Structure formats: structure tokens, C-alpha cells
Image: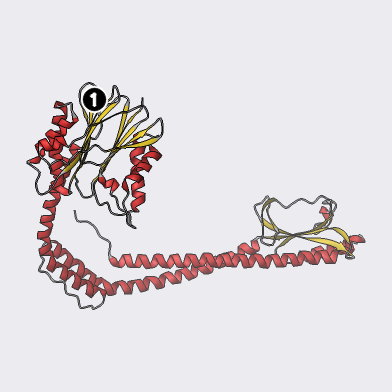
């Protein structure tokens, strides 16, 4: 089924129409706000003028109880447009004069529910019928000394509402004219650019179907003409790009296969170590890398702990790591002695590793029953141990040459074996040099000292918190710098 497309002419008209409506709407809102403020100010000035005029003229008549003259003044005030009531009440709220004589000597009550105060601090009420009233007040003082009471004048809010309605009508009319003009302008503009765009679209379709010899010809020398020239230049390079793309896809497929192999070797979960917890993290510097870690179940509650780093990156490092993993898993199950395991690993890889490549490996056997750890290292840097009782960090670095450098006898002779005891609350932290050699933007490396500080800070938490804390400290130190080496972290802690 052919996909439906909207016309560019309609899209241009829709955009221009939307902008026109948006601009007129914004301008309309601004005009209405200005008009509303202006009308409110005008009403407040008029209301205050009427109220003060009443207060000034009626005071003496109320003082001498000349009710007819007082009523006359109030009735004259009612002649002002929008005035709904006018009255004078004493300090106790008793009405002394009112435009409605029947209200005299009754108690003053607000005209309805109080809504809000205007900018001039006059009160807006809503009557029982739903009509809004602005009430104005002024002190009534006779002979400039005797305070008689307060004059009240209520003016209908409809004066503002009716004026705003007229403004609404004017805005709608202006908007209608603006829409008509924008539609006409959009139609003319879209008609001028539609034809060359159609030619561009048709040319792109032909090129997309494989005809790389097709040329798009547009007479316009504006941006559309430049775009046509760019498309024509692009087709000339597509033939070469096709060959490069085929090679790239083949390489990506090889990398994908290598990544799947490597990913299958890294443990997705760890064996149950009863009293112990394990957490790990791995991120290659490229699509695939050469770091490796594992927890290998042995016999009688014993486990082999591995952290390895193959020199180099990419597919060669991943292939050596694959061989290393296979040999290490086989030899660790057959040999209880860690020195023997790494010697066998060195013999197995020595004849296969060439081109100056080598691997550093840390290997330890932990007895979960007694808490003992026996460790050896083939050129790997030190591991860190957090002691829960003292909240201190210890560093251990058994001597030994890297895998693939020395022959069997000399390799085993140089290897040192270290034993230690893991107590409740202790944690082991192993990592590759992607951590210690991480570079900051301003220069300098993360180093072992910062790794010790990170473990010191997070050692009392879970192994996952230890790993995440170290990774977070490295990322903060590097400040977003591109990762220069593979990163692998493994933490094992005793909980009971």
C-alpha cells in the first residue's frame, strides 16, 4: 500500500496560519489585559470621585438631620452610569441615608459574597443574582472635625465587561483579516517553491532506487538550486560508499560475533557463596575488550577468584581472553594450588600468544568455610582489602611475571603466594588498570591512592555500593573524558 503524504503547500500554509493565530492571540491577550487595567483604573477613579463627592456634600445635612437634602444628593449620585446604590452608614453600621429611603435606619450589609480587592484596594462582591459589584467607601466628616460615618457607593462591574466585549469583537475582526492575508501570502509562497521541491523529491526517489547516474536539474539558483547540486555530488560518491559500506557491515558482523563470544564468558550471575556476596562491573573501551573476571566454583566450599587484563584491545584481545578463560576454568578445577593453576595457564598460552601480546592475571582461592584466601598474581597490580573491624584498607601485591612472557620453570620460580584471613565485614576489591590509569581532562591519572580512598569511603556498604562508588569516583575524576582502557571491577565481601 502506497504511503500517503501531505502536500508541502498545505504544510507551509498551516505553519503560517498557526504563527498568525499565535501572534494575534498573544497580541489579543496583551490588549485585553491592558484594556482591563485601563478600564479598572478609570472605574476606580470615577467611583472614588463619586463617593468622595457624596461624603463631602452630605456630611452637614446628615449632621443637622436634613434628610431630604441628603436623599437628593444620593439620588443625584445614582444618575452616574453604572451606580447601583449609594448610602451613608454610621460607625455602628446603621444606615443614615440611602438612595432607597426604605433602607434608612437598617443595618448595612455587604451586597454579596466578597471576591477580591482591586489594585485601588476597593472590594469586588458577587450578588445573589451573580452580578459583580465594586464597592467604594469614603469617610463622612462634618465641619472637617465630626466623623459621622462612611459613604458607600456600589458600581456595576458590567461597565468593564461590556467594554471588554467590544474589544473582543475588534480582536476577532483583526484576526479574521490577518488570517485571510496570511493564507493568501502562504499560497503564493508555496506555489513559488513547490515545483523545484517536486523535482528534488523525484530525483531523490530515482537515485534511491539505484540509478546513481541520474542528475537533478533545477534552474533556480537559490538554496534549492544549491541543494540540487549537493544531491548530484552526493550520487557521484555513493558508488564508492557502497563498497565501503559492504566492508563496514562485514566488520560489524565480525565484531558482533566476537562480542557475543566475549559476553558469554563473563558471568551473568555468580555461584552461591553462602556467607559471601559478589558484585561486578565491566565496560570495554571499544566494542569488545580483553578484560576478564570470574568466580569459579571448586570443591568443598572453595571458589576461584579471577581478574585478568589482556594487553591491547579489540578482537585480538578478546580471542586471547577466550583462550585464557577456557584454560583457567579447566586448570582451576584440576589443581588446588593457585601457583600451579597460573603455571599451567602460562604454558597453555605461551605458544599461542604472539606479536608481543601478554596478559596479567590475579588468581585467588577462597575457602568460604574458614575464610582463608590464598592469592597469586601474574603481573597484575595489587588488590585492596577492606577490614570491617578497623574500617581500614590493606593492599596486597603478590610478585609474578605476566602470562605469555616467561617459560614455565622461570615463570613458577618468580611467583609469590600470599595467604590472608577474611573476617565478617571484610571486602576484597579487584579491578583492571582501566580504573587506576583513568585520565582526567586536566591531566593526571586516577591512581591507586584514590581507589583506596573510594574503598575507605564505601567499604562499610554492600559490594554493589563498593563497585558503584568506585565507578562513580572514576567518572567524576575523568570529567566525562572518553574511556581509554577497558574497565572491570569485582568485589567480594563476607557478610557473616
Q: Position of residue 68 (x, y in %)?
A: 88, 62
Q: Position of residue 124 (x, y in %)?
A: 68, 56
* Residue occupying the point 35% across, 45% down: 449
Q: Is residue 489 visible?
A: no
Q: Is residue 179 above or below residue 392?
A: below
Horizontal relation, residue 295 to residue 184: left or right:
left
The quadrant in which the C terminus is found is top left
Nearer-the-camera pick, 242 or 416: 416
* Residue occupying the point 33% across, 39% down: 467
Q: How many marks?
A: 1
Nearer-the-camera pick, 401 or 157: 401
Instruction: Name the element at disc 1.
Output: strand
**Residue under numbered circle 1:** 302
Nearer-the-camera pick, 126 or 396: 396
The image quadrant that residue 136 belongs to is bottom right
- Furthest-right residue in this view: 64
Q: Is residue 28 above or below residue 95?
A: below
Q: Is residue 381 above or below residue 135?
A: above
Nearer-the-camera pick, 398 or 216: 398
The image quadrant that residue 472 belongs to is top left
- Furthest-left residue in this view: 351
* Residue occupying the point 53% across, 69% down: 170
Q: Position of residue 270 (x, y in %)?
A: 25, 31
Q: Is residue 297 visible?
A: yes
Q: Position of residue 131 (x, y in %)?
A: 66, 55
| Pointer 1 local density, CA inside 10 Å: few below 14, some 14–19, many at least 20 | many
Amino acid at each position: 500500500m502506497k504511503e500517503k503524504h501531505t502536500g508541502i503547500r498545505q504544510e507551509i500554509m498551516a505553519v503560517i496560519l498557526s504563527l498568525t493565530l499565535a501572534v494575534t492571540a498573544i497580541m489579543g491577550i496583551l490588549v485585553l489585559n491592558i484594556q482591563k487595567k485601563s478600564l479598572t483604573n478609570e472605574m476606580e477613579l470615577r467611583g472614588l470621585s463619586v463617593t468622595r463627592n457624596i461624603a463631602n456634600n452630605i456630611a452637614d445635612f446628615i449632621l443637622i438631620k436634613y434628610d431630604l437634602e441628603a436623599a437628593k444628593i444620593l439620588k443625584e449620585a445614582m444618575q452616574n452610569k453604572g451606580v447601583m446604590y449609594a448610602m451613608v452608614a454610621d460607625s455602628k453600621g446603621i444606615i443614615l441615608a440611602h438612595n432607597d429611603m426604605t433602607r434608612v435606619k437598617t443595618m448595612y450589609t455587604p451586597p454579596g459574597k466578597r471576591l477580591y480587592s482591586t489594585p485601588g484596594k476597593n472590594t469586588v462582591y458577587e450578588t445573589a443574582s451573580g452580578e459583580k459589584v465594586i464597592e467604594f467607601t469614603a469617610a463622612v466628616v462634618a465641619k472637617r472635625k465630626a466623623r459621622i460615618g462612611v459613604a458607600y457607593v456600589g458600581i456595576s462591574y458590567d461597565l468593564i465587561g461590556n467594554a471588554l466585549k467590544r474589544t473582543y469583537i475588534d480582536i476577532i475582526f483583526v484576526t479574521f483579516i490577518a488570517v485571510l492575508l496570511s493564507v493568501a501570502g502562504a499560497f503564493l509562497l508555496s506555489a513559488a517553491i513547490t515545483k523545484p521541491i517536486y523535482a528534488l523529491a523525484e530525483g531523490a526517489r530515482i537515485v534511491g532506487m539505484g540509478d546513481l547516474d541520474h542528475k537533478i536539474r533545477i534552474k533556480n539558483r537559490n538554496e534549492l538550486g544549491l541543494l540540487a547540486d549537493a544531491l548530484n555530488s552526493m550520487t557521484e560518491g555513493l558508488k564508492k560508499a557502497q563498497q565501503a559500506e559492504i566492508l563496514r557491515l562485514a566488520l560489524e558482523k565480525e565484531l558482533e560475533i566476537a562480542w557475543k563470544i566475549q559476553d558469554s564468558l563473563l558471568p551473568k550471575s555468580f555461584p552461591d557463596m553462602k556467607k559471601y556476596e559478589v558484585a561486578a562491573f565491566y565496560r570495554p573501551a571499544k566494542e569488545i575488550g580483553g578484560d576478564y573476571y570470574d568466580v569459579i566454583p571448586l570443591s568443598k566450599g572453595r571458589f576461584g577468584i579471577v581478574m585478568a587484563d589482556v594487553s591491547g584491545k579489540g578482537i585480538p584481545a578478546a580471542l586471547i581472553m577466550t583462550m585464557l578463560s577456557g584454560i583457567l576454568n579447566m586448570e582451576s578445577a584440576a589443581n588446588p594450588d593457585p601457583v600451579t593453576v597460573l603455571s599451567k595457564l602460562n604454558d597453555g598460552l605461551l605458544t599461542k600468544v604472539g606479536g608481543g601480546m601478554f596478559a596479567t592475571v590475579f588468581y585467588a582461592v577462597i575457602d568460604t568455610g574458614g575464610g582463608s584466601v590464598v592469592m597469586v598474581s601474574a603481573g597484575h597490580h595489587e588488590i585492596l582489602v577492606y577490614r570491617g573491624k578497623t574500617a581500614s584498607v590493606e593492599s596486597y601485591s603478590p610478585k609474578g611475571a605476566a602470562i605469555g612472557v616467561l617459560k614455565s620453570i622461570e615463570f613458577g620460580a618468580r611467583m609469590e603466594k600470599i595467604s590472608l584471613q577474611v573476617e565478617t565485614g571484610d571486602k576484597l576489591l579487584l579491578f583492571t588498570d582501566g580504573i587506576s590509569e583513568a585520565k582526567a581532562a586536566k591531566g593526571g591519572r586516577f591512581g591507586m591512592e584514590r581507589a583506596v580512598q573510594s574503598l575507605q569511603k564505601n567499604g562499610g556498604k554492600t559490594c554493589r555500593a563498593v563497585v558503584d562508588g568506585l565507578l562513580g569516583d572514576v567518572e567524576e575524576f575523568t570529567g566525562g573524558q572518553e574511556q581509554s582502557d577497558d574497565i572491570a571491577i569485582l568485589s567480594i565481601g563476607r557478610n557473616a
